[in-house]
Image: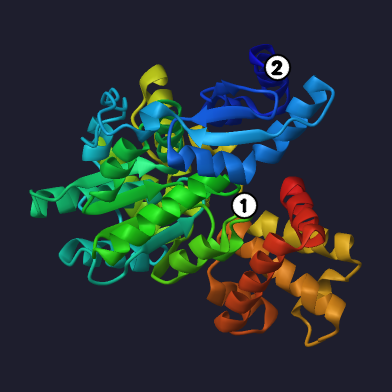
Amino acid sequence: MSTLWDQALAELRLALPNQDFAAWIACLRMSADTNDALTVEAPSAFHRNWVQRHYLERIRTTVATVAGRPVPVVLEVGAIGKSATAPMPQPIRARSAVPSLGAQSQTFESFVVGPCNELASAAARSVVDTPGAQYNPLFIHGGVGLGKTHLINAVANAVRARFRSYRVLAITAELFANEMVSALRRQQMDTFHQRFRRIDTLLVDDVEFIAGKERTQEEFLHTFNLLCAAGKQIVLSSDQAPRAISDLEAALRSRFEGGMIAEVTPPDRETRRRILVHKAAVVGIDVIDPVFDYLAERIRALSVRELEGALTRLRAVASVTGRPIDLALAEEAVEPVCHDKRRVSVERVEQLVGTYLGVDPRQLASPLRGARVVFARQVAMYLLRKMIGLPYAEIGERYGRDHTTVLHAARVIEARRACDPEVRRLVSALEEKL
């Protein structure tokens, strides 16, 4: 039987993902050698129950295949799992909750507020004033490089400063998942639970990472429910709204949508200018006002990082050429890598949508309400909002609608993209072309 179990383990190692095998199967041990059954021990009752639900049929099939006949497989809790005097496991090697130097510099004072992020910033400040009392959870979503992580760290730093006895943890969803896997492998889930369920303020960045990961979502939901029930504050960020995250468990989506949802969008011209002024002061670049005006107008940035990149290029060209940073240098340095995304992309979006859906682009702004035209118009509105960052009111004005119609259109396409494969493929193809 020992040989049989060893052979079965070898087959299971090949059949299962490496992470699943290492976490759940490798630590199982054969304990009984009889002609009637193969008895296998798990390190804990929780581990046994999980293997029974998710892997027992696979184990039985594999054992029968190796043995050439049906062999009953019995799962039990091992002696160590039953013993109250079992040796304590080594602590999980987890990243410290102490913020990094970069995170420490991300405060509300260094966050530039504009119409694109005003709601998210105000909600984040309210969370600091009364943690757990309102906006719980606070869910911040938006594109890459728009300040979500900055707000996460700003909340963490402000809560630490205001409530010095609070246990505050700012972590990425990927690190949460990695620590959970580490705990499973080391049989230290109790330690993992204590680490995350005794937090006063939990902040999780890039929460979309756990989508599709069944075990991680289960643990995260338990942690979420326990912290919320205890009145603890949770702040989450994602590149998508909860309803648009595919493969997210319904229970988690419901909990995420039960709090405050705030979107951050690409900055408008005035906010771009204020960001440029702030970033230039931080890095010590001496820039005159006309240069800021020019950069804010020409760089229709979809992220703050594009603005930072423009300043870096401007500084580098000035350093290499020995010239002062004036308007002429700005035009020379930035223009080759800058194009008017808004003017060109609006036309390109409408042309592509019309081509893909068989609609004359001119019909998008018409009063026509046929199903094909309405769908094409909604897709165009969605792309103009997501890819270019046009304000809802401006998109509505272009198509003769109000901003609520545009908001509804964006939400419809976002929801259909999450659940309809054909719409998902269409929108992805359009985004790739753009």
* Label 2: few (<14), some (14–19) or many (≥20) C-alpha neighbours in 10 Å: some
In the image, residue 166 lies at what x, y percent? Answer: 14, 51
How many numbered markers are drawn? 2
Instruction: Answer whether residue 364 is visible to the viewer in this image.
Output: yes
Q: Which residue is mark 2?
A: 4
Q: Is residue 180 above or below residue 408?
A: above
Q: Residue 225 vs residue 210: left or right?
A: left
Outermost residue, front direction? 35
Residue at 71% across, 51% down: 431
Considering depth in this image, is 286 or 127 the residue closer to the camera?
Answer: 127
Q: Is residue 318 above or below residue 370?
A: above
Q: Quadrant of residue 291?
A: top left
Marks 2 and 1, Cα distance to the nearest angstrom?
Answer: 65 Å
Considering depth in this image, is 78 or 104 the residue closer to the camera?
Answer: 78
Q: Which residue is mark 1?
A: 341
Considering depth in this image, is 90 or 181 the residue closer to the camera?
Answer: 90
In the image, residue 52 lies at what x, y percent? Answer: 59, 42
Outermost residue, top direction? 3
**Judging from the image, what secondary structure is the residue with disc 2 in?**
helix
Sequence order check, earlier mark of 2 and 1: 2
Q: Is residue 109 above or below residue 324?
A: below
In which quadrant is the N terminus drawn? top right
Residue at 44% across, 56% down: 221
Residue at 48% across, 60% down: 265
Comparing labels 2 and 1, the label whose residue is closer to the camera: 2
**Judging from the image, what secondary structure is the residue with disc 1 in?**
helix
- Residue type marked 1: Lys
Residue at 61% across, 46% down: 53
